[in-house]
């Protein structure tokens, strides 16, 4: 009689085998402290920044010309002084307030535009044409016109901010909606979801990677546009923001203060990028295992 | 044995950019309660399109689809779908939330009620340990089990399964077929199942509708499929018969 044979390997055999060679065949090994530190991106980047800061200090000390390139310590001292006397925080607050106004208004407009675009063909065509036209146009180029329309003040700033946020967010949100898989759409409709509930419960979370990208790009555009716009004017809109702070101190030839202003711009940008957006990303995209 | 789903003389057409394609032509059949009704045929016979029409995603150009006497006009939670694609689960929800979500939005259940029901069905598909995991951490077979639990938890009139095991590896597929049958033994839900595997059709179904391709027409209906047995060779014999039926036609396209 022909039949296949099965030869059993018992697990006990394998176990006694590993006992003899426990050291070599361990499945996991703890990494050393140095290896773990080097594996941490934040540690590597902090080291890099420290090296750059050292280079700055050394170069500026050798150059010894505070009008061209102040030392890091001078910059930091000025920065501390300006923070203590309240000017820098007040300027930063002014900038951030205007920025948030423009950013939120831009997002709301983008949401409305995208809503129309996903529901109607004309809306889609409108969105595509408008983004194709206005996305390549730097927002700051509209500032002279905005000054005529809205005068020297927050109105003009908010107008150019909306322009810098709206198209980036609308474009990304719309392409995110279009990219939602057919299966997920069918699942949503299977649950009987329609209209606003369908958009809110299926499309927005499914398109969230693209939407978040749009929000990040919009934020970066808005921040740059604002600082650039404030360099042009600022004195009449109450106190003026960080851009005006930089411009003012250049006129006073207080170069360490100019550097302090630039550093503040960078720090606020980093905080928003690394704390706000990274946290949102960690809580959503990474947890869900989705990427854009 | 009452008629649950009645499909009569349904013709389905869809548009491609250049032409109007007829997917199925005057297809009629009816499904009874607790049937495991399998649509079987080669690619191009319109079996998936037919299932989606029952799901309410395609409107028939002719004929009508009625479930419990109601005309099917749009998708709805009385006909829960299980798709082939693994991305049918919502990645922003955990396993438990995925099963709870339709219970809350389509059945208007309270959170507590939905959670209890979802847990019970996830126990049935043996995913108790994974209820708080996000779906991307699951294997393909586990994702399909969640989708099945989600469909069953809704206790729909009919569960529509569109080649749910086609994207799984062969070993997992066999295991899933066995599990589906065990689940059916427990609750005797009505299921409509699309496949292109003859062996799977015989294993899963108690009735099989054979469709011929281009356009899809009913070729034959096999009933009492659950009477054949894999041990005495009758299943293998039926498999040969069905194979001959499907591929007897000269000049068929694969």
Image (cartoon, rainbow, N blue to C red):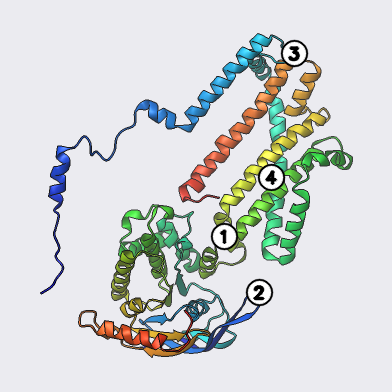
Q: Which residue is mark 3?
A: A67
Q: Tell me the CA gap for discs 4 and 1.
A: 25 Å
Instruction: Assess disc 3: are there few (<14), some (14-19) or many (≥20) residues with their C-alpha within 10 Å of its C-alpha.
Output: few
Numbered disc in front, either 4 or 1: 1
User: Which residue is located at x 65 percent, y 24 percent?
Assistant: A263
Q: Which mark is residue A104?
A: 4
Task: Look at the image and tell me whether residue A186 can be seen.
Answer: yes
Element under disc 3: loop
Q: Quadrant of residue B20?
A: bottom right
Numbered disc in front, either 1 or 2: 2
Vertical comparison of A35 with A55: above or below = below
* Left or right of B130 in this view: B101: right
Q: Quadrant of residue B97?
A: bottom left
Instruction: Assess disc 1: are there few (<14), some (14-19) or many (≥20) residues with their C-alpha within 10 Å of its C-alpha.
Output: some
Q: Which residue is mark 1?
A: A180
What chain is tagged by disc 1? Answer: A
Q: Are marks 2 and 3 on the same chain?
A: no
Q: A36 or A200: which is nearer to us? A: A36
Element under disc 4: helix
> Residue B197 at what x, y percent from top left?
38, 76
Q: Which residue is mark 2?
A: B17
């Amino acid at each position: 009689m022909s039949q296949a044979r099965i030869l059993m390997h018992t697990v006990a055999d394998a176990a006694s085998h590993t006992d003899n060679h426990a050291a070599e065949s361990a499945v996991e090994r703890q990494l050393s402290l140095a290896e773990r530190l080097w594996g941490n991106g934040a540690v590597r980047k902090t080291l890099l920044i420290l090296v750059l800061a050292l280079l700055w200090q050394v170069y500026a000390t050798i150059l010894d010309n505070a009008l061209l390139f102040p030392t890091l310590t001078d910059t930091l001292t000025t920065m501390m002084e300006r923070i203590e006397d309240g000017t820098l925080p007040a300027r930063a607050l002014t900038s951030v307030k205007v920025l948030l106004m423009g950013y939120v208004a831009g997002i709301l407009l983008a949401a409305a535009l995208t809503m129309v675009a996903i529901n109607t063909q004309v809306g889609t065509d409108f969105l595509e044409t408008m983004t194709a036209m206005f996305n390549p146009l730097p927002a700051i180029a509209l500032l002279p016109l905005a000054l005529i329309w809205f005068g020297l003040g927050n109105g003009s700033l908010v107008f150019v901010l909306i322009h810098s946020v709206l198209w980036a967010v609308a474009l990304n949100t719309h392409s995110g909606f279009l990219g939602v898989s057919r299966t997920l759409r069918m699942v949503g409709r299977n649950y009987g979801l329609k209209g606003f509930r369908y958009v809110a419960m299926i499309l927005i979370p499914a398109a969230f990677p693209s939407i978040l990208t749009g929000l990040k790009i919009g934020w970066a555009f808005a921040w740059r546009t604002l600082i650039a716009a404030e360099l042009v004017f600022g004195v009449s809109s109450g106190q003026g923001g960080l851009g005006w702070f930089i411009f003012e101190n250049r006129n006073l030839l207080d170069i360490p203060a100019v550097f302090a202003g630039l550093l503040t711009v960078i720090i606020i940008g980093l905080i928003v990028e690394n704390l706000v957006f990274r946290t949102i990303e960690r809580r959503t995209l990474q947890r869900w295992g989705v990427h854009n | 044995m009452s008629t649950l789903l009645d499909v009569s003389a349904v013709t389905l057409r869809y548009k491609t950019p250049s032409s109007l394609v007829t997917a199925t032509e005057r297809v009629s059949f009816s499904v009874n309660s607790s049937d495991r009704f399998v649509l079987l045929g080669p690619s191009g016979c319109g079996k998936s399109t037919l299932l989606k029409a029952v799901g309410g995603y395609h409107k028939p150009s002719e004929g009508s689809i009625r479930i419990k006497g109601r005309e099917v006009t749009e998708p709805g939670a009385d006909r829960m779908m299980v798709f082939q694609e693994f991305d049918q689960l919502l990645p922003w929800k955990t396993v438990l939330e995925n099963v709870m979500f339709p219970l809350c939005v389509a059945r208007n259940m309270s959170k507590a009620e939905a959670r209890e029901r979802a847990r019970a069905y996830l126990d049935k598909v043996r995913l108790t340990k994974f209820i708080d995991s996000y779906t991307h951490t699951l294997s393909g077979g586990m994702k399909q089990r969640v989708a099945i639990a989600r469909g069953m938890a809704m206790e729909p009139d009919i569960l529509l399964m569109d080649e749910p095991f086609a994207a799984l590896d062969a070993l997992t597929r066999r295991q899933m077929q066995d599990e589906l049958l065990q689940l059916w033994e427990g609750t005797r839900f009505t299921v409509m199942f699309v496949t292109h595997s003859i062996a799977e059709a015989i294993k899963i179904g108690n009735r099989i509708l054979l469709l011929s391709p281009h356009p899809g027409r009913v070729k034959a209906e096999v009933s009492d499929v659950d009477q054949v047995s894999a041990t005495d060779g009758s299943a293998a014999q039926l498999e040969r018969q069905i194979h001959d039926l499907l591929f007897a036609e000269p000049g068929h396209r694969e």
